[in-house]
Image (spheres, rainbow, N blue to C red):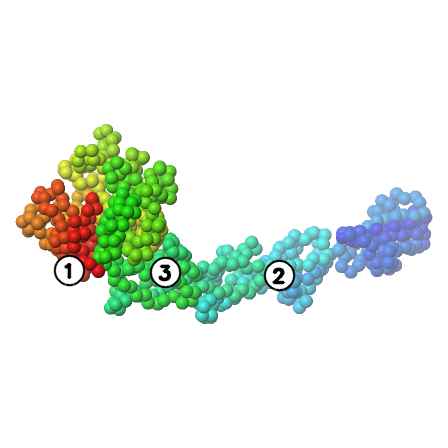
Amino acid sequence: MIAVSILAIMAMLSACSSSTGPLLIGTIRDAYTGEVISQANVRIGTQSLSTDTNGAFQTQRWRSSDTLAISAPDYEPLSLPLASQPQVAQSSSMTVTLETNLRPNTLRGVVRDAYTGAPISGAELTITLNVSNTLVLSSTVEGGYRFSDLPEAFTLDVRAADYAPYTQTVSRTTNLDLSLRPNVLSGQVTDRFTGQPVAGATVRVGAAQATTDAEGNYRVTEIAADEQTIEINADGYAPLSEEIGQTTVLNSVLRPDTLRGRLVDRSTGEPIANATIIATPNLPGTAVAYTQIQSSSDGSFTLKGVPEQGYIQVLSPGYAKEVLEISPGNLPEEIGLDRFVVKALYVTAAVASSSKALQEYIDLIDTTELNAIVIDLKSDLRDDLGLVYYDSQVPLVKELGLSKPYIDIQPLLAQLKEKGIYTIARIQLFSHDNMLSDAHPEWSIRLKETGEVYADYPGPGIRYAYLDPTNRNVWDYNIQLGIEAAMLGFDEVNYDYIRFPDWYGDKASFRDTLLFSEPMDPVDNPDRMFEVLTEFMQLAHREVNEAGAYMSIDVFGRVTLGPSMTIAQDIGRMGAYCDYIAPMAYPSLWGPGAFGLESPVDQPYEVLSASNAAGIEQIKDRYARLRPWLQDHTDPWAYKVVKYGPDEVRAQIEASEKYPEIDGWMLYDSANVYRGAFNGAVRQK
């Protein structure tokens, strides 16, 4: 600021009317800074004076009626009637001192780039004095500007192409250098591996965005002040996010993260119709990218979100899982799969917990056509029915104390893998899990009349509590066990008892007797019961597949002929949400007249042949493949007790292998005796 001080000395006020008289001395100062102003022009009457280097002037040639007119470059002119000044009117001394200020009326400065400091030429600066008076000018090549005739306070607006608008209220200021923030960002987006431009990429900086052109170039404008991150997304590429910093040009490279390929049968070259393709960072590992093809005519697929390093895993029903290590910039366009047919036998958790007992079954697999083993994860013994037989880390299992480390699971799986044995983890789902039912009775089916847990009692001292198929806690518990099994290294997760209770009364009594978390009515709303099971399967299938394992389900043998109530099993519907369906079409379970047979238990080949044919028809064009359970035990509860041995078992194998639509078989004997398998039913290698 600049102040003007006038020191006036005069000897006698009465003589002010004369041409000479008392001495008038003054000093002119800047009103904003208080600094003296030299070379200011002072006019008194006809006399013109200039201030010296101290901003002072003096004269004796003045009258009290004179007006003091003061002016200086870059200052607002001032007219000061001497008669109105108290110093003049009241003083009786020979000298009079007057102090007056001159107000600056200019503003000058340089407009620069806030990032580089370079001057900005052609910036438009605007000062609005009132509705009818606006001052506008442009900065020079050197970025300079200068306004004059300004009031003490005003608002300054600055605009320049590619810069954020700038507005500032200015008060009592004469020099103001301005820094404008660039609000544009431009650059080129290219493919990391090929160097080719990426067209159609979306480039975002906060709310501002642009799309790359055919050459991969982009230009984002009107970027907000607090936005410092650029995000780039393009189909087929991993999203990119990086800090902008103080720059207006940023070239970026995108990593392809999309695998577009084709699945074929490695032997025939024919396309694969159904498959799940995942990408995992590790082995084992859960998927970070997932896709599934169903009924594809050409085997083509698109997998988005592939990591830079990791593994591609392909799970196709009827084929061995294919695992490919991801090589940067070199993802395969065609993946060949090898047919795989499971030939398995089942062992209980109790057998699996004894390495000595289990070895007998491993040796049988080693020396015969058998190539797979089904292992119970939960106990099927009445004393600890449902107890998890290994040290499970599933949170709810640990919380409820529902596992015991009877099976040293990881060394066992390592041994089986070393021998090339395909491993299947069997999990009882809604029945044969008294441990979970007892821990959480409210998760079970209950009797409406008493609130007691509903259970099957198939024999003296045998109780099979029934968990509620509509209860999502039961779903989560068993899905987590399935995921854990896959992560431990099991090739497949098999869910048994995936059904509602088999009710021997009428359907109305089922509805009126049993209490579920969600009301179930097989009379008026049977579809909902089917949907409950397929909804569980849809969720479980993806979770298990994403952990790198196949998923299979067990169903009653009669379901090969069509949907069945009240168990709510319909393999036509279920076939969309699993990899394999395993009907338990044991010949001893069919009564005389089934399939037009006089005595089905005596005709194992005919039973399996007919059941398989019917099952194939039920799931035709579905995602899942058929793989039946075969009877290798003597059923003491059958209408006729027939001792089953190698001939009966072999007959079932042949009745299954004659169908190309069937992918293997699994032998079942709850006692794990296997009179058929151990006595020649399975062929030697």
> Is 637 positioned to the left or the right of 21 in the image?
left
Residue 475, given in percent of the width and then of the height, sits at 30, 43
- At mark 1, the secondary structure is loop
Q: Quadrant of the C terminus?
A: bottom left
Residue identifier under label 2: 115
* Nearer the observer, 414 or 544: 414
Whole-Å distance between the Cαs marked 2 and 1?
77 Å
Q: Is residue 430 visible?
A: no
In front: label 3 or label 2: 3
Residue 149, given in percent of the width and then of the height, sits at 72, 58
Residue 537 higher or lower than 660, as above or below: above
Give the residue type at disc 2.
Answer: Tyr
Residue 478 higher or lower than 343, as above or below: above
> Which residue is pictured at 30% across the width and 54% down the height?
416
Q: Is residue 306 visible?
A: yes
Point out the tag, 3 or 1, that comes first from the N-terminus: 3
- At mark 2, the secondary structure is loop
Residue 358 numbered mark, or none: none
> Which residue is pictured at 14% across the width and 55% down the height?
650
Residue identifier under label 1: 658
In front: label 2 or label 1: 1
Residue 262 higher or lower than 131, as above or below: below
Give the residue type at disc 3.
Answer: Ile
Give the residue type at disc 1.
Answer: Lys
Residue identifier under label 3: 312
* Nearer the observer, 347 or 496: 347
Residue 176, given in percent of the width and then of the height, sits at 69, 57
Q: Residues within 10 Å of mark 3 (few under 14, many from 20)?
A: many
> Which residue is pictured at 94% across the width and 47% down the height?
94
